[in-house]
Image (tube, helix red, strand yellow):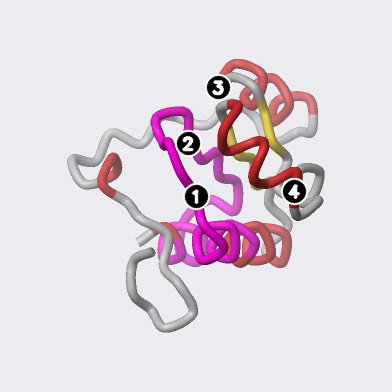
Amino acid sequence: MVTKYLEEGSPNLILDLTGIDFIDSSGVGALVQLAKLAQSRGGIFQVVSNPRITQTVKLVRLEKFLSLRNSLQEALDHLAAEGGGRPEPDTRPDAAEARPEGPDGQAS
């Protein structure tokens, strides 16, 4: 669903993972694929993280590539500074349930 949003909608995406307690290599891989897709469309991909997610991403040295941010406001400010403007919040009922798809097309 997130991949479809990037392909058909805005190339900019802020993914808020502050409520996530754990991410494994499959999850990190899905984030990398989303970042690559956003970049290929000229967009900005950012991850709002918490200390546990940040620690995992830093272990594999992807914190800059995934543009980790400490807060949603920080991510919005960065997007505005980069010329991406302030996106309207996605208020679709299924938006909160979006899960990144893995390489096999299944939600991770």
The x and y percentages for residue 15 are 51, 40
Mark 1 or mark 4, earlier in chain = 1
Q: Which residue is mark 3?
A: 72
Q: Are marks 2 and 3 in contact (CB under 8 Å)?
A: no
The circle drawn on residue 23 is 1
**Quadrant of the snapshot with the C terminus:** bottom left
Inter-mark Cα distance, 3 to 4: 23 Å
Q: Which residue is mark 4?
A: 59
Q: Residue at x 66, y 19 (%)?
A: 74
Q: Nearer the viewer, mark 2 or mark 4?
A: 4
The x and y percentages for residue 27 are 50, 59
Judged left or right of residue 26, residue 62 is right
Quarter residue 25 falls in:
bottom right
For mark 3, give the secondary structure: helix
Q: Are marks 1 and 4 in contact (CB under 8 Å)?
A: no
Please name the amino acid that badge 3 sits on: Leu
Mark 2 or mark 1, earlier in chain = 2
Inter-mark Cα distance, 1 to 4: 12 Å
State the extent of the magenta-drawn residues as a range: 3-32
Q: Residues within 10 Å of mark 1 (few under 14, many from 20)?
A: some
Q: Residues within 10 Å of mark 3 (few under 14, many from 20)?
A: some
For mark 1, give the secondary structure: loop
Judged left or right of residue 45, residue 3 is left
Mark 3 or mark 4, earlier in chain = 4
Q: Residues within 10 Å of mark 2 (few under 14, many from 20)?
A: some
Inter-mark Cα distance, 1 to 3: 19 Å
Please name the amino acid that badge 4 sits on: Leu
Mark 2 or mark 3, earlier in chain = 2
Residue sitting at the far left: 93
The x and y percentages for residue 16 are 48, 34
